[in-house]
Image (cartoon, rainbow, N blue to C red):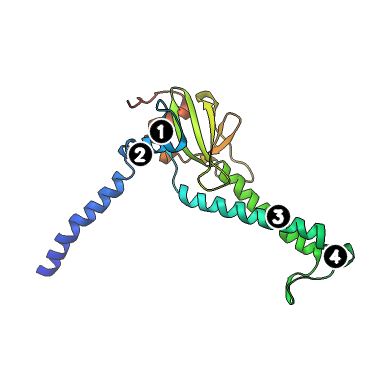
């Protein structure tokens, strides 16, 4: 009994520390600590305030590199095959890799596989290109940071407060809560990752402007 009491006494402070650390990692103070580093990385002037940072940036970086490499490789491989190997007279013959590996039952079937592969990967790339990594604010002007096609490449898009609108769900993409219009560009933004809820509410409803940190 005393042993159980002692064990609980030892574990309780540690559990409390873990919970507190998890909370602090999502606290607005975290933005202040890292804001200078992200501004330098994005080459953004000091008068822009970091108000949003999305999760999973590193993994999305890896995924983007893989998609770019695989789509380019398979695409060029298919073009090479069509230009120098493909023969219309053997279109119904199995496509064989090496001596005995059957890739497809016919040239047409192989083309369908390649088109589906490239199309699926291109669709994911388009989706990733709309994912906002970071968002900066300067008065009623905003700067969105998107990922590029290679590792750690970024693209910038400026827009005004009045350009920000929530998009309606579509038949293809039903999760409309995270889809927004930034003027002439559509974006995916997760509202729970703003510095404080006031920044998102001001963007969406255009009222109760949050106080800008010095």
**Can you say whether 45 is above or below 148 in the image?**
above
Residue at (68%, 52%) from the top-left corner? 119
Residue 190 visible, this orientation? yes
Asked if labels 1 and 2 touch by Cβ distance under 8 angstroms, the answer is yes
Q: How much space separates mark 1 and mark 3, taking CA atoms? A: 38 Å
Q: Which mark is residue 91?
A: 4
Residue 174: in sight, yes or no?
Answer: no
Q: Earlier in the sequence, mark 2 or mark 4?
A: 2
Tell me where residue 36 sits by quadrant: top left
Q: Few, some or many C-alpha atoms within 10 Å of disc 1 (few <14, some 14-19, many ≥20)?
A: many
**Mark 1: secondary structure:** strand
* Camera-side residue of 35 and 201: 35
Which disc is residue 50 wearing?
1
Q: Residue furthest bottom?
A: 100
**Mark-to-mark CA distance, 3 and 4:** 19 Å
Q: Provide the residue designation for mark 2.
A: 34
**Towards the viewer: 64 or 84:** 84
């Amino acid at each position: 009994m005393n042993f159980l009491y002692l064990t609980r006494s030892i574990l309780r402070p540690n559990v409390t520390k873990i919970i507190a650390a998890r909370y602090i990692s999502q606290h607005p103070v975290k933005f202040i600590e890292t804001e200078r580093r992200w501004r330098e990385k994005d080459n953004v002037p000091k008068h822009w305030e970091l108000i949003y940072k999305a999760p999973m940036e590193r993994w999305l970086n890896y995924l983007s590199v893989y998609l770019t490499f695989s789509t380019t490789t398979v695409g060029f491989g298919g073009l090479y095959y069509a230009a120098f190997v493909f023969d219309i007279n053997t279109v119904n013959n199995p496509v064989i890799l090496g001596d005995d590996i059957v890739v497809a039952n016919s040239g047409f079937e192989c083309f369908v596989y390649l088109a589906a592969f490239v199309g699926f990967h291109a669709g994911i790339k388009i989706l990733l290109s709309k994912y906002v990594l970071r968002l900066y604010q300067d008065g009623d002007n905003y700067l969105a940071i998107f990922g590029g096609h290679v590792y750690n490449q970024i693209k910038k898009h400026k827009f005004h407060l009045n350009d920000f609108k929530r998009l309606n769900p579509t038949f293809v993409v039903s999760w409309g809560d995270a889809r927004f219009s930034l003027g002439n560009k559509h974006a995916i933004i997760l509202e729970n990752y703003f510095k404080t809820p006031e920044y998102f509410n001001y963007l969406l409803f255009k009222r109760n402007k949050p106080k800008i940190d010095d």
